[in-house]
Image (tube, grey):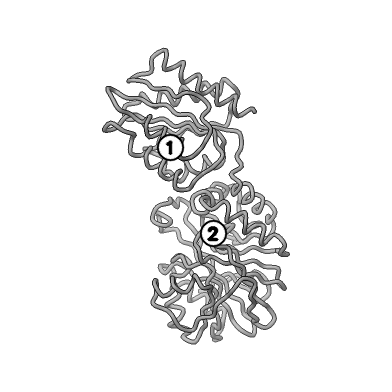
Amino acid sequence: MNQAIEIKKNIFWIGVNDRRTHLFENYWPLPKGVAYNSYVIVDEKVAVIDTVERSRMDDYLESLEATLNGRKVDYLIINHMEPDHSGAIKALLCHYPELTLVGNSKTFPMLENYYGIHTNLLEAKEGSCLDLGEQQLNFYMVPMLHWPETMVTYLPKAQLLFSGDVFGAFGTLDGGIFDDQLDLDYLEEEISRYYSNIVGKYGMPAQSALKKLGGLAVSTICATHGPIWRSHIPEIIAKYDKWSKYETDEGVVIAFSSMYGHTEKMADLIGRFLAEKGVKKIRIHDTSKTHPSYMINDIFRYKGVILGSCSYNGGIFPTMETLLSELENIGVKNHYLAFFANKTWAGGALPRFTQFADKMKWEIVAPHADASGSPKFQDVEDCRKIAYAMAEKLKE
């Protein structure tokens, strides 16, 4: 069945939805699935823009062949080599053995390492062009968004940008494919979670790309995941600009690890004391239950972060260690920090929290709280001090 949808004259979406994969990159949860977006331009020459994950190859090739109606593919533009976009390259070559693969100097070593392909290559360079007939493709390098070989492809006549993973989202395209056909409120968390989980580490490259591409006249953005943007382009660009500058909203994320409930009591106390001071946007997460994906997304959103952990084998609890390691790896910036701990006899989380604070360079707003077992009067007061200090800091 041909599931291709025309975006603009002779430019088609030939992507697929994936509702079976549970984890993106075998790590990030996909409760709402994911779309792999590929595109084809049918001109004097035919160009395919990226492919799809290989598990959806049959449906993908069926749509492509039906759209081309017997014509061959002349070019495959490889904006990004990650296998969810390059997974069908070998199958495409089996169907169209004479096609030319277009990428940049950093694309081709990956192409050979992944698929053993090293012939019929055409190198795209910064600002170079490829003439298809009516449409011309212009190439711009956007390295580290989020791989070093990443580039985008721009069609001046159509005012259309094939943006790769930039402006992408988790979530399948249910019904329509365009932003004005979809329930963006339903996808809001999947859009921000995609940025924070996948692109979030690369704020500076994102800012560079926004500046580089800012002068282009763009009426349609075609990313490799998520909606095709045509009616809310200023809004999605503004989101990326805000997120990549690490700008946040007033609010607090409390993440805790607790075995027997004592550390959780401290988390709840801090939440109550924050509310006393008028903080409404409070998100409390149990690190043993909530995947880091969602906690990271909230931390990208809110300025205040308060972390708490029980002692485990003399150190920090494993699920809290996972969260700290993820935050260190992503390098999230510009937050206020406080932390609390609980132990039974010795050791505990405080040394690891101190190490984390030193590495992240976040501003510590109050001394830590350190309880032994069920929180006592002084522990409650220490929790109060943390909450009140954070609330005051957020008002500055």
Q: Observer-nearest residue: 240 or 97?
A: 240
Mark 1, mark 2: which one is toward the viewer?
1
In percent of the image, x 56 and y 86: which residue is there?
Answer: 71
Quadrant of the rendered image containing residue 393: top right
Q: Observer-nearest residue: 325 or 275?
A: 325
Circle 2 SS class: loop
Amino acid type of the residue tagged 2 in the rendering: Leu
- 45 vs 53, left or right, is right
In percent of the image, x 70 and y 54: which residue is there?
Answer: 234
User: Relative to residue 190, is residue 69 depicted above or below?
Assistant: below
Quadrant of the rendered image containing residue 89: bottom left
Spot occupied by residue 225 in the image (x, y as percentages of width and height): 53, 60
Spot occupied by residue 380 in the image (x, y as percentages of width and height): 44, 17
Spot occupied by residue 249 in the image (x, y as percentages of width and height): 61, 37
- For disc 1, the neighbor class at 10 Å (few under 14, some 14 to 19, many from 20) is some
User: Relative to residue 171, is residue 376 depicted above or below?
Assistant: above
Amino acid type of the residue tagged 1 in the rendering: Phe
Image mark for residue 356:
1
User: Relative to residue 51, is residue 373 depicted above or below?
Assistant: above
- 383 vs 373, left or right, is right
Circle 1 SS class: helix
User: Relative to residue 193, is residue 34 depicted above or below?
Assistant: below
In percent of the image, x 45 and y 46: which residue is there?
Answer: 293
Spot occupied by residue 391 in the image (x, y as percentages of width and height): 58, 25
Residue matched to label 2: 145
